[in-house]
Structures are given as C-alpha cells and as structure tokens.
Amino acid sequence: MPERRLAWALALLAAAGLAWWAARARWSQPAPDRPLAGLASEALVRLERESGGRTLTLTKRAGRWSADGSPADKALCDALARGAQALTLTGRVDADADRYPDYGLGDGQAIRLRAWAEGAAAPSLDVYLGRPAYGGVVYARLADEAQVRLAQGLPFDELSLPATGFLLR
C-alpha cells in the first residue's frame, strides 16, 4: 500500500512540474506585437521604403498614391499599407547587433519601412526587414529595439519591387 501512495505522490508531483514548465515556457515569449493594431490602413498616408541606399516615398493625397511624385499603382500601394497595418512581430530571436548580418539585418542588407498616419510628424512604424526565415516570415527588428524578431503580414514580394514597379501603368 505505501508503494502505491508513493507512486501517486510522484505522479502528482511530476504532473505539477510539467504544468509549471509549460506555463513558464508560454510566458517566456512575448505575445505577438502588432505595432499598428489601433490604426486603420486607410489612415496611412505616407510609406517610405529604404533599400540599398535608395529611398522610395509613397504618398497618398485625396485617395491617390504617388511614388516619388509620379502617379502610383493604387492597388499595390493600398496592399502595402494594409500589410504595414497587419504586420505582426513574434518571438525573440537574437539581440546581439554583431549577428544582425546573419539575419539580413546588417548595414546595407535590410529593407527599412516607415509608415506615417495622417497628421503625424513621426512615423507610426519604423521597422527593418531582413532575409526570409521560414514559413512566409522574415527576420525583422523595430528601429528602436535591438531584438531580432519574426515578422509576418507584409507583402514582402511587393515590398522588394524596384521603384518603377510602383508606378501607374
């Protein structure tokens, strides 16, 4: 009989330990972060993409987009604005700046995306986007954070288009 009680006590202790470990593991990763969650994509009136030392500025006025002053493809620009609004950052990958190049986030490697809401003096979003990780996500970090995270939600193929790809045809 005592062996049976001991076995039950050990099983309960193991179950409690497993539950504690699972809860701790779940709490050790931050909740997904959506930097523009409280902002409608229609409220974004300026997007800047910096890549390879060149900056492309997309500006929306009266419902029409322009790319560096020339008429731009509305559907493409709207998709990029929706993607910026839907951007979700998850997990913690690395906070060592010396390893940024491993994630495509080194100087001259990353795409920098900034988004402004109507009437805002500073960007509502300032993010560096690196190389693809897996499953449709890319490595990323917010400009004011050292932490490399995983990003999803942006149309990364469109974001990588040359500036002429945004022009109205």
Image (tube, rainbow, N blue to C red):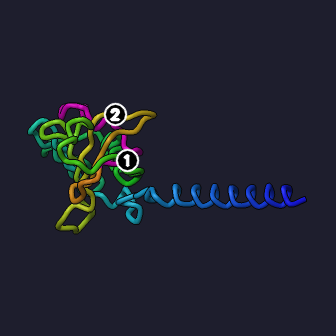
Query: Which residue bears the numbered disc 1?
Result: 83
Please report the residue visible at 79 percent of the width from the left and 55 percent of the height from the top: 7
Residue 32 spot, x, y in % from top left: 44, 56
Magenta span of residues:
148-169
Vertical placement of residue 145 versus 74, above or below: below
- Quadrant assignment, res 139: top left
Residue type indicated by callout 1:
Gly
- Res 71 visible: no
Residue drawn at (27%, 51%), measured in percent from left and top? Answer: 95
Q: Nearer the viewer, residue 165 or 152?
A: 152
Q: Which mark is residue 40?
A: none
Q: Left of 59 or right of it: where is 23?
A: right
> In the drawing, what numbered circle is on residue 132?
2
Amino acid marked by disc 2: Pro
**Residue 18 placement: quadrant:** bottom right
Report the quarter where the N terminus lies: bottom right
Residue 68 lies in what quarter of the image?
A: top left
Whether the magenta-drawn stretch holds residue 93 is answered as: no
**Cβ atoms at labels 2 and 1 below 8 Å apart:** no
Can the viewer see residue 148? yes
Question: Quick one: label 2, few (<14), some, or many (20+) residues within 10 Å?
Answer: some
- Given residues 37 and 21, the one toward you in this image is 21
Is residue 155 inside the magenta stretch?
Answer: yes
Inter-mark Cα distance, 2 to 1 = 16 Å
**Residue 89, image x and y in percent?**
38, 51
Q: Residue at x 37, y 51 (%)?
A: 92
Q: Residue furthest right?
A: 1
Q: Give me the residue at 35% from left, 39% from top.
A: 138
